[in-house]
Amino acid sequence: MSTQASEPLDVERIRRDFPILGREVGAGDRLIYLDNAATSQTPDPVIDAVSEYYRGYNSNVHRGIHHLSEEASIAYEEAHDRLAEFVGASGGREELVFTKNTTEALNLVAHAWGLRELGPGDNVVMTEMEHHSSLVTWQQIAKRTGAEVRYVRVDGDGHLDTDHARELVDEDTEMVSTVHVSNVLGTMTPVAELAGLAHEHGSHIFVDGAQAVPHRPVDVEELGVDFYAFSGHKMCGPTGIGCLYGRADLLAAMEPFMYGGGMVRKVTFEETTWNDVPWKFEAGTPLIAEGIALAEAADYLEDVGLDSIDRHEHELTEYAMGRLEEFDDLEIYGPPRGEERTGVVSFNLENVHAHDLASIMNDHAVAIRPGDHCTQPLHDSMGITASARASFYLYNTKAEVDALIEAIDDARQLFA
Amino acid sequence: MSTQASEPLDVERIRRDFPILGREVGAGDRLIYLDNAATSQTPDPVIDAVSEYYRGYNSNVHRGIHHLSEEASIAYEEAHDRLAEFVGASGGREELVFTKNTTEALNLVAHAWGLRELGPGDNVVMTEMEHHSSLVTWQQIAKRTGAEVRYVRVDGDGHLDTDHARELVDEDTEMVSTVHVSNVLGTMTPVAELAGLAHEHGSHIFVDGAQAVPHRPVDVEELGVDFYAFSGHKMCGPTGIGCLYGRADLLAAMEPFMYGGGMVRKVTFEETTWNDVPWKFEAGTPLIAEGIALAEAADYLEDVGLDSIDRHEHELTEYAMGRLEEFDDLEIYGPPRGEERTGVVSFNLENVHAHDLASIMNDHAVAIRPGDHCTQPLHDSMGITASARASFYLYNTKAEVDALIEAIDDARQLFA
Amino acid sequence: MSAGRDMYRQQILDHYKNPRNYGELDDPTFSHVGENPLCGDEIRVEVKLDEDDETIEYAAFTGDGCAISQASASMLTDELRGLTLKELAALDREDVTDLLGVDVSPMRVKCAVLSEKVAQDGAAIYEGEKEVDVTKTE
Amino acid sequence: MSAGRDMYRQQILDHYKNPRNYGELDDPTFSHVGENPLCGDEIRVEVKLDEDDETIEYAAFTGDGCAISQASASMLTDELRGLTLKELAALDREDVTDLLGVDVSPMRVKCAVLSEKVAQDGAAIYEGEKEVDVTKTE
Ligand SMILES: Cc1ncc(COP(=O)(O)O)c(C=O)c1O
Ligand SMILES: Cc1ncc(COP(=O)(O)O)c(C=O)c1O
């Protein structure tokens, strides 16, 4: 955790930046949005960045000479540098590729690197709490190449079993792929330690930071990772954009993933050479408005302060867990209160299916998410098919947590 | 061409929908935007659809129970049906996948189908006027699978040599991949004829409709094609979204391209089964705002009338070519005036490099595009490295063509 | 605060907590299973036909899942008794939501109609009109 | 209507139409090539050093491309005469645009600086400080 002093958030002021939070749903209650791990809400400056783009300088990029294209190109290219800086990548745009989401970032590396580098005898080590985006991707690429997949155990309290990791990672490990923060358990994995372990064995490490980057300062160089991915729509940015950080030398050496305009240098009917990173990995007309708006989201989050956001969520989570523990027929998953933990709380109420619970919560204008949260194998190993998940962000309040508790209580009574 | 009666466009009214067209560039001239083949401008209803999404119902889709997710899911899913209908696909969402652009649509089929189906002895037939998005993609997938690529000749007037196509397509042809409209020459290829030829030989046909769908009615079933792709940002829609049409049975039988959340049905640590089309091909949090806004763009274009847009562009192009022919030191590429031809006019002025020409045009606030337009091999075979391209859309006027001509004349005098 | 709680009106909760016709039949004429991936609902419907091989004598179900799917299976199996296979085939989404007596939200309709689709597919398979492995609503 | 036409002020057009120092040297001390993919510009710069192996006696270029790249190569090769390799290495983007005497738009700067980068890379290779195959500005 960062040692920088963090200011408490002025949540009321922050909420005014998010027009959707003033919205009423259903019978006229004001929306209580606790589904932030799925998608965060979007502040005015980001929404405005999109409109300003389309109203002011919408144009295709890279090769255009005219004013609009020049403005769009500069803004789009600089957005890469901005996001690189946001996660501590000193190489700027040479280490930061825009993808449509975290999932594409994983697929990019799994296809461009994995399909070529993996083979029989090799293995990929993941954790049992991987999101489907990495779990299914590496599983399938391994199947296609004859490599093996291994999963590091998660214990009953949601901690990663690092001893088990040390058993699994060996000289045949080519990639360690881990979440930074579990989107179900709120667990933080010891990324720096895993990076060390991977590198000791000559393996690479890919970190899925979809649940980390939006919520706390992340520095990929301090963590010592090779690849790191995250999504715009979970960090106050727009849909349709994500980022892949990759160490400059690795990205430079990698073959492209998708082919097309913009990623080439010289094309003949017979053969093609590639453009520089990141363009080599961005085939076709890129995510222009999305990339520019994501840079705006990064500015927004840094203006508020990532340390402060982290602290705010920590307080809300502690408070919520305390209140949830009042119910003796409610089970909370993941590390116990008091431990390091992010603003994601998943639970089940005895005798109430998570989807029924979510429907009743919705009645109270409380938006939570029921289901397996794209972690079916984790849910299987916990012996459940679904859980209810509340997840907090910078604009949430204790009053909203109280409303959550009240709604849960209503469901309990209804189903009693 | 459609036989439906088409109303002339009320261009002045249309222009009011596009805020950017009121913009001044450089020294204060009003923008004359003739770079529509690269990216079209965006009308208010589409810009508003994006803001309304973020202000009103931004949420992750598919599995959410709460109000916002329900609204977003329905809008996002229905957007697929809307775009399917827009290109005459009767299967609705089961035949329409959202991708980030035309390029990804091509890569989807080339990877998911091509990597598995192509092998030594097989061949893929393209045209010499393919955009890099198909040319490089099939070229590279062919290299990786040992298949051969063949290019159908384009004659000096920009016509596709269909006799040559008949020579090239044989029993070993697995895919015919062709542009519908050349983004350089304005040529329309005989798609229905090529589809017939492909199918006679047991081959599939993929059509790159990036330059067709924005400008005229397209009916994939009438054309009889297997796959058809186009991009949102060229049809008054947002960046970051494109469409892949595929015949229902073909898409249903295909393996996925990318892996992750949303595209799965059942996941275990060992194996995974797939969701239905289109979700099987949309891994991760999808392009939600983008898809919804693209449906709005389809509505906008149909309200204006695709036949009318086609006719308007045809008239502008005829007029522009007539005026360009006044210069005896200017060479126009593609089919001569009077022939079927879309609103793309590429040319070179003797002794003036296309990029210098574009810079001088920009001085006149005229936005055109110089370069190889992602068709290096075509430019090579025309014996040029670059061309200047003006491309028209529904909001362009004859007065703007006159401004183009004036700017060209200025460049001529400067370089005389 | 209406729609949601409404969706769980007393009758539904009653059927959920005390499902009717729950269990397996000794001698079903046909039986079929289905899943709703949204909530992980699973339902098996078993049907015993009269000697006319057309009228439903009784129906039963087993399964697991959310209140909406389980309650609607309970109500539906009650309702099926005495219906002909033709009448079963003619049932639609509205018939089920009428049974439930509530407005089911668009996302949850898949839960509500699962047992109906399973019964219909089971009958269609029995009559040789369809081949389905596992019925799915999504 | 300034910036663009401005970019082609008389002097640039003059150098473009009548390039100085165009051609190949008989006995260059070093020569190097570069490309600017934006405009497809290609430039070869050849340099002949004085006997001190340090001062540029004369420089020449050949190439093809847009007016900005060709004119700036013409001006630069004029300018190089008498410079030391150290002075050449110290030249920056502004020195070239000063030479051109115009504001080059951000997109076209790559054209303007191509010959400068080629000359600098050529010198660095000659002095064993760098290994470059083809210099690129993009
Ligand atoms: C004919 C053609 N095909 C494909 C493309 C690629 O489209 P996108 O860049 O949106 O993927 C374009 C436009 O750039 C095009 O003109
Ligand atoms: C931990 C984790 N990884 C990956 C993802 C996938 O992100 P996206 O859907 O934006 O690709 C998510 C979110 O859904 C997540 O929570």
Image: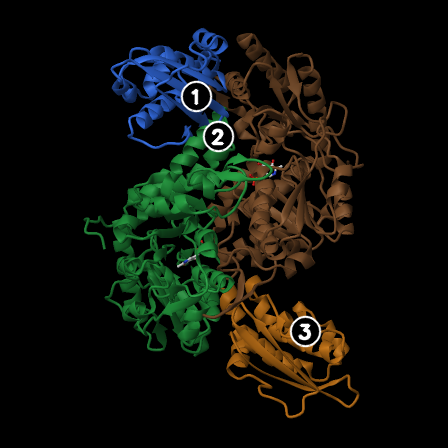
Chain colours: A green, B brown, C orange, D blue
Does A16 sit left or right of A25 as displayed?
left
Circle 3: is it few (<14), some (14-19), or many (20+) Cα within 10 Å? Answer: some
Quadrant the N terminus of chain A occupies = bottom left
Q: Quadrant of ligand 2?
A: bottom left
Quadrant the C terminus of chain A occupies = bottom left
Residue drawn 62% across the image and 25% down it: B383
What SS does tag 3 mark? loop
Ligand 1 neighbours mark 2 (CB distance < 8 Å) = no
Whole-number angstrom distance, CA of label 1 to CA of label 2:
37 Å
Q: Provide residue B195's location: percent of width, then percent of height.
A: 75, 46
Depth-wise, is mark 3 or mark 1 nearer the camera?
1
Instruction: Examine the image and state in which quarter residue D35 appears.
Output: top left
Check if mark 1 and mark 2 are on a common chain: no
What SS does tag 2 mark? helix
For the view shown, which residue lies furthest in the bottom direction? C26
Whole-number angstrom distance, CA of label 2 to CA of label 3:
53 Å
Does A85 sit left or right of B331 as displayed?
left
Q: Is residue A38 above or below residue C102?
A: above
What kind of residue is marked 3? Val
Residue D44, which numbered label? 1
Residue that badge 2 annotates? A57
Q: Is residue D6 above or below residue B125?
A: above
Task: Return the residue nearer the eye: A185 or B302.
Answer: A185
What SS does tag 1 mark? strand
What kind of residue is marked 1? Arg
Q: Provide residue B260's location: percent of width, then percent of height.
A: 48, 59
Instruction: Examine the image and state in which quarter residue A291 appears.
Output: top left
Dot 2: chain letter? A
Dot 1: chain letter? D
Residue that badge 3 annotates? C132
Do labels 3 and 1 touch, CB within 8 Å?
no
What kind of residue is marked 2? Tyr
